[in-house]
Amino acid sequence: MPWFENRLGEQLWYEDSGSGVPLFFLHGWCMSSVVWHRQFSGLSDTFRLVAPDLRGHGKSRGASGQMDFGRFAADLEDLIHHLDLSRLVLVGWSMGAQIALQSYRQLHDRLAGLVLVSATPCFTAKDDFPFGLPRKEAAGMHLKVERNIRRALDGFHSRMFADGEIVDQQEALQIRALLDSVVPPDTAVAVDSLDSLAGADMRPFLKDISLPVLILNGDRDVICLPQASDYLAEHIKSFSRRVFAGCGHAIFLTRLQQFNQEIIHYAGRICDSNA
C-alpha cells in the first residue's frame, strides 16, 4: 500500500483497496488503519476503501508537530485531493468522527455522506454539555499514558466493550488479536492527541452540515456516551440513526455484519439519490 506526501512534505501511510464508491475510514485515538481490517475484507468487493494512518499513528510515525485537530484535518484534505476522490462517504470512529466534523467545511463539496460511529462533539463534559467524560477522568488517562502507555491502552481496550457483548470465544480471540496488532504510537503522540481530544469542541460545526448523516452507536458505550449521539441527532439537519443494543464503543468489530450492512445500505441510498 502507498505513502503520500502532505503539504508539509511529511510521508503518511494509507490503505487503499477495491473499486467503486469510495468509503473513507478514519480510526480513533491510539489506533491505526489496521482496525478496519474486517471492513476491508467485507466491503472491498463492492466499494473502494481508503483508510489512512493518522499522523503519529500506525506507519505514519514520521509526522512531526502538534497532534491537533486542525493538522489532522489538513492531512485528511491533502490525501483526498491527492487521490482526487469525490462523492465519497467519510466514516469516522470516535476521535476519527471529530476529525471528520472538523474537516467538513473544507471537504463538503467532495462528500456524498458522513457516517459518525461512536461519536461525540465533545469528549470531555462542559457546563453546557454534560454528555462527555468528566475532565478529571481525561486527566487520569493522561497520567496513565505517561506512566505506561501499553498498560493504559490495555485498560482502554477493555472499556471499549460492554459486559456480555462478545459471547463467542473465538470471536473474542480474533478481536483481541486485531487490537494487539495495532502498534501504539509514541507516548508523546498519545499524550498530545489525547490532550487535543480532551479540549476539542465540534458543536459549532454541526449547524453547517447539510449532507445526510448516518449516526451509529452502542447503547452501552462508556467512552463516547450514547447521550452524545442523541445530541448529534438533535443538532444535525438530515440524519438517520441506528443504535446497537448491548454494545459499547467498537460496534464495527463486535457487530461486524450489522455494521457493514448499515454502511452498504446508507452508501447505496445516498449515492442513488445523488445520481
Image (cartoon, helix red, strand yellow):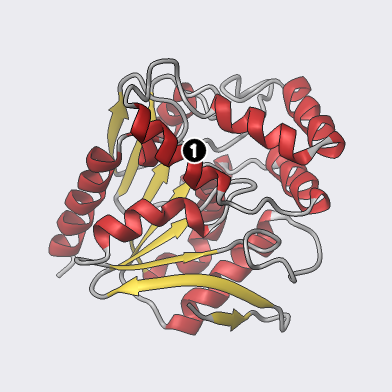
Q: Does residue 148 appear anywhere in the picture?
A: yes
Q: Is residue 206 left or right of residue 266?
A: right
Q: Position of residue 34 (x, y in %)?
A: 49, 56
Give the image quarter of residue 95.
top right
Residue at image coords 68%, 25%: 126
Q: Label 1 is placed on what type of residue? A: Arg
Residue at image coords 73%, 46%: 196
- Label 1's element? helix
Q: Position of residue 4 (x, y in %)?
A: 58, 81
- Of residues 119 and 250, the one drawn nearer to the viewer in this rendering: 250
Report the number of numbered marks.
1
Q: Give the vertical position of 213 relative to 1 (above or below).
A: above
Residue at image coords 75%, 47%: 190
Q: Give the vertical position of 32 relative to 121 (above or below).
A: below
Give the image quarter of residue 61.
bottom right
Q: Position of residue 19 (x, y in %)?
A: 26, 75
Task: Write down the residue under mark 1.
Answer: 176
Residue at image coords 23%, 42%: 257
Among all residues in the image, which is located at the extreme top? Answer: 163
Badge 1 crowding class, 10 Å Cα cut-off, few under 14, some 14 to 19, many 20 or more, is few
- Of residues 170 and 71, the one drawn nearer to the viewer in this rendering: 170
Q: Is residue 95 left or right of residue 83?
A: right
Q: Position of residue 234 (x, y in %)?
A: 39, 30
Q: Give the vertical position of 129 relative to 12 (above or below).
A: above
Q: Does residue 113 appear anywhere in the picture?
A: no
Q: Is residue 46 left or right of residue 13?
A: left
- Of residues 155 and 95, the one drawn nearer to the viewer in this rendering: 155
Q: Is residue 11 left or right of residue 38?
A: right
